[in-house]
Amino acid sequence: MSSVGTRTSAPTATPAAGRISGPVWAALGVVYVVWGSTYLGIRVVVESMPALFSGAVRFLAAGALLLALLAVREGVGVLKVTGRQLAASGAVGLLLLVGGNGGVVIAEGSVPSGLAALLVAAVPLYVVVLRTVSGDRPGWAALAGVLLGLGGLAVLAVPGSGGSVKLGGVLLVLAAGVSWAVGSFASARLPMPGNPLVASAYEMLIGGAGCAVVSLLRGEQHGLHLGEVTTRSWVALAYLVLVGSLLGFTAYAWLLQRAPLGLVSTYAYVNPVVAVFLGWLVLGERLTGAELLGGLIVVAAVCVVVTTARRGKA
């Protein structure tokens, strides 16, 4: 799961096949590294800041900045949407950012960032399941990839396989992945705004507001003491707003218009590698043998699903 809150529907026009240009590789590099690094950023933020409070600040700030940039660049008129489009953006934003990203943020209070990324990597597998349930039959290779991935998730989630990691945190990340998958799946079927940047801005604003409401319901305000928030948590939050939510999304949105969707989707199995590496390098996180095995199985399964999609067989 990226931590950005973007639309994940395919573009209306399929980019022409051909040699991959330098700018495409550069944008892919941004998505690979930036989205992979957001798991580390979240882990650092929740060290001294309430989980959903941080999510509310992040997405409200990013959404407001994106709306302002769009208004300056393209005029205020670009922000106009219908009531149905706003409602659709709100529904997707709540699924992606409250249920999806919010669940990961809460879980990372007890789950290492690398493990969380490995668990979230299974989102493309859930999307295949949703396609199957809706009557869009994927190929056998994709279904085999799902079964392989579920086996990997079982290894990751077995009680005790994560050492000191609590099963509840693992299950919360899995549930968050399902919410992200449902939001991603729904975004291609709801009457979203035609401009994906506008859609994402409203998703972030409504999702951020949802995070704020849930934060209040959880009583996070009682444990919030701004004076006790560390400098590195503030820096990590600023990174998530400016780099994770704005730069990462912009690169992703541009890629959807300039590169094959199958190629863009490779972030799903590159992000966990980046997250695991950064968790080890910066926070000294360690994964058990079982976690590494389960993670490798999940990443392999996602590779199968994405590869079959690129070949038009999924």
Image: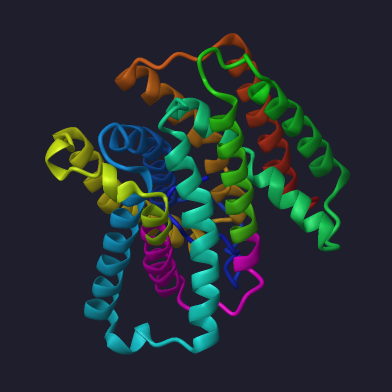
Q: Residue furthest left?
A: 227
Q: In the image, which residues are magenta?
A: 185-212
- Please say if 155 is above or below 229: above
Q: Residue furthest top?
A: 289
- Please say if 240 is above or below 11: above
Where in the figure is residue 55, as x and y percent of width and height? 35, 51
Q: 276 or 263, which is in the foreground?
A: 276
- Please say if 207 is above or below 75: above
Task: Tell me, yes or no, whether the highlighted magenta stretch contains residue 205.
Answer: yes
- Please say if 22 is above or below 299: below
Q: 219 or 131, which is in the foreground?
A: 219
The overriding secondary structure of the stretch rendered in magenta is helix
Where in the figure is residue 259, as x and y percent of width and height? 53, 56
Where in the figure is residue 211, as x and y percent of width and height? 40, 57
State left or right for residue 161 relative to residue 313.
left
**Residue drawn at (47%, 27%) of the image:** 111
Specify whether residue 310 is in view: no
- Residue 225 found in image quarter: top left
**Residue drawn at (26%, 52%) of the image:** 242
Task: Tell me, yes or no, whether the highlighted magenta stretch contains residue 211.
Answer: yes
Where in the figure is residue 115, as x and y percent of width and height? 52, 26
**Residue drawn at (59%, 62%) of the image:** 16
